[in-house]
Amino acid sequence: MRPENSKVSIVLATYNEKEHIEGMIASLYETIAQPLEVIVVDDASPDGTAEIVAGLDYPNLVLIRRKARGLAAAFHRGILESTGDIIGWMDADMTMPADVMRQLVHKLDEYDIAVGSRYAEGGSDNRHPMRVNSSRLINWLARTVLGGGIGDYDSGFVAIRRSVFDCVTLIPYGYGDYFIEFLYDAYKSGLKIVEVGYAFKDRAVGISKSAPSLVSFFVTGMGYIIRIFALRFRFLSWRR
């Protein structure tokens, strides 16, 4: 069950999400009990995403407008502005269900970190086979090199106790690779991590921010691989 008397802050990082953002926010307020704070960090979306959010009327709905772009940096900014005892972050494109976020929050009576996982029991990944196979390869590499037994190292769908930041820092650069580093540091700090399986479905409208082209898809994947080995080298260096 949800930790007693806890306030939940959910951070959504947006860029061109006008088709999804209103429905995503509504589903969070319908699914997660008060006290709830939803923080939308918009990276200067030219499609009017921020204006849609500004016109909504929900308690503790916060809009932050940034001129810069960057997923990890946007989540980091939202986390800094949050006031909840529990903090969650997730995509705003309806691929990550609000009901699963509620389940993650409820796991925090026993765990420090709860991860929405495509590859844990009950999970599935229903994207294009190229993206699924690439993600599985990255996660296999992360488990092999870093350990920890985590099935979905680059999930980016999570709820945590605020106290996690007493042990771990979220490094505000990268795409899914920032989350690999976050989970690895949490694992090495001895924090209790649980994965909750869910069905990930590719976005119905718009273009994925992780793979707008084959070239950027390849470059992003190489960034993940480099960061995985850099993390392992960093830990080995510290032990000497």
Image (cartoon, rainbow, N blue to C red):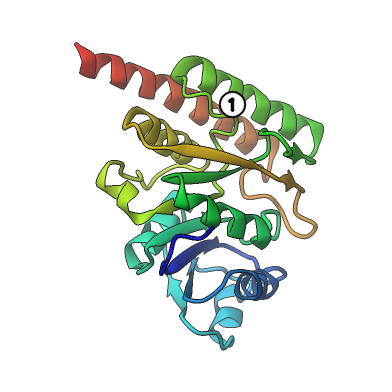
Tell me: residue 188, above or below residue 155.
above
State the residue in front, 153 or 106: 106
- Local crowd size for mark 1, using a 10 Å CA cut-off: few (<14), some (14–19), many (≥20): many
The N terminus lies in quadrant? bottom right
Q: Is residue 75 visible?
A: yes
Residue 168 left/right relative to 109: left
Q: Quadrant of residue 62?
A: bottom left
Q: Residue at x 39, y 53 (%)?
A: 161
Give 1 or 120, whichever is nearer the viewer. 1
- Image coordinates of residue 70 in percent, x first then y, are 46, 52
Q: Position of residue 182 (x, y in %)?
A: 40, 39
The extreme left residue here reads 240
Q: Is residue 3 left or right of residue 18?
A: left
Residue that carries the numbered disc 1 in the rendered image: 139
Q: Is residue 159 visible?
A: no
- Quick one: quadrant of the C terminus? top left
Left or right of 220? Residue 82 is left
Q: Amino acid at mark 1?
A: Asn
Quadrant of res 239: top left
Q: Position of residue 155 (x, y in %)?
A: 58, 41
The number of callouts visible is 1
Q: Give the residue drawn at x 65%, y 30%.
A: 135
Q: Secondary structure at mark 1?
A: helix
Q: At 41% from the left edge and 30% from the top edge, which residue is drawn? A: 184
